[in-house]
Image (cartoon, rainbow, N blue to C red):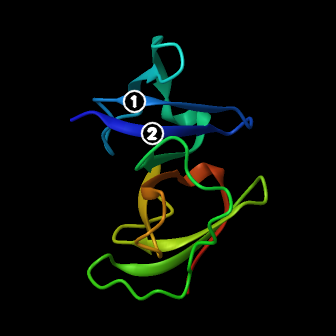
Amino acid sequence: MIAKIVVRYADGRVVKGTTEDLAANKMLFHLAEAETGKRYEVNVADLKAIFFVKNFQGNSEYQEQLDVERVGLGKKIRICFKDGETLVGYTQGFSPARATFIVFPCDPDSNNEKVFVVTAAADKVEFV
């Protein structure tokens, strides 16, 4: 299945594109850039997070609702990244010993379907 993703690198770069081979147990995947179609291999260790999105445009004016209760998505979690960004959502499998984990947004109307978080890019992770 082809997934639309926004790749956020630990160094601040952002690349929009698609992938067909990203898996939680793999540290490498292939990205096809949306703008150029260029395909290349990405090392998950170089990333902050991968945002699986509904569309690439998003809505910069939309304010996500963080107080929405979503049943069946796991425990509510707050991630404070090393770059100062904070992400709040739900996860079913966070462990500081794992290289990555998945977070589902609080707001079902978010443009993000899920976020693949690189644990090393987080400064603080807490259940809320």
Q: Residue lying furthest right in this view?
A: 84
Quarter of the figure with residue 46: top right
Q: Which residue is drawn at 48% across and 65% down?
A: 110
The answer to whether one can see residue 115 in this image is: yes
Q: In this view, does 120 lie above or below 32?
A: below
Quarter of the figure with residue 80: bottom right
Q: What residue type is labelled 1?
A: Thr
Circles 2 and 1: CB distance less than 8 Å? Answer: yes
Q: Is residue 98 above or below residue 47?
A: below
Q: Which amino acid does label 2 sit on?
A: Ile
Q: Relative to residue 15, is residue 31 drawn left or right?
A: left
Give the percent coordinates (x, y) of residue 57: 55, 43
Question: Count of labels shown?
Answer: 2
Residue 18, numbered label: 1
Q: Relative to residue 14, is residue 84 drawn left or right?
A: right
What kind of element bears circle 2?
A: strand
Quadrant in the picture for the N terminus: top left
What kind of element bears circle 1?
A: strand
Of the image marks 2 and 1, the number of the one nearer the N terminus: 2
Q: What's the CA distance linking mark 2 and mark 1? A: 6 Å
Q: Which residue is drawn at 54% across and 20% down?
A: 35
Q: Residue at x 70, y 32 (%)?
A: 13
The answer to whether one can see residue 98 in this image is: no
Looking at the picture, tell me which residue is in the foreground, 105 or 60. 60
Give the percent coordinates (x, y) of residue 26: 34, 35
Q: According to the image, label 2 marks what residue? A: 5
The residue carrying pointer 1 sits among few (fewer than 14), some (14 to 19) or many (20 or more) residues within 10 Å by Cα, namely many
Quadrant in the picture for the C terminus: bottom right
Q: Residue at x 78, y 60 (%)?
A: 84
Give the percent coordinates (x, y) of residue 34: 48, 24
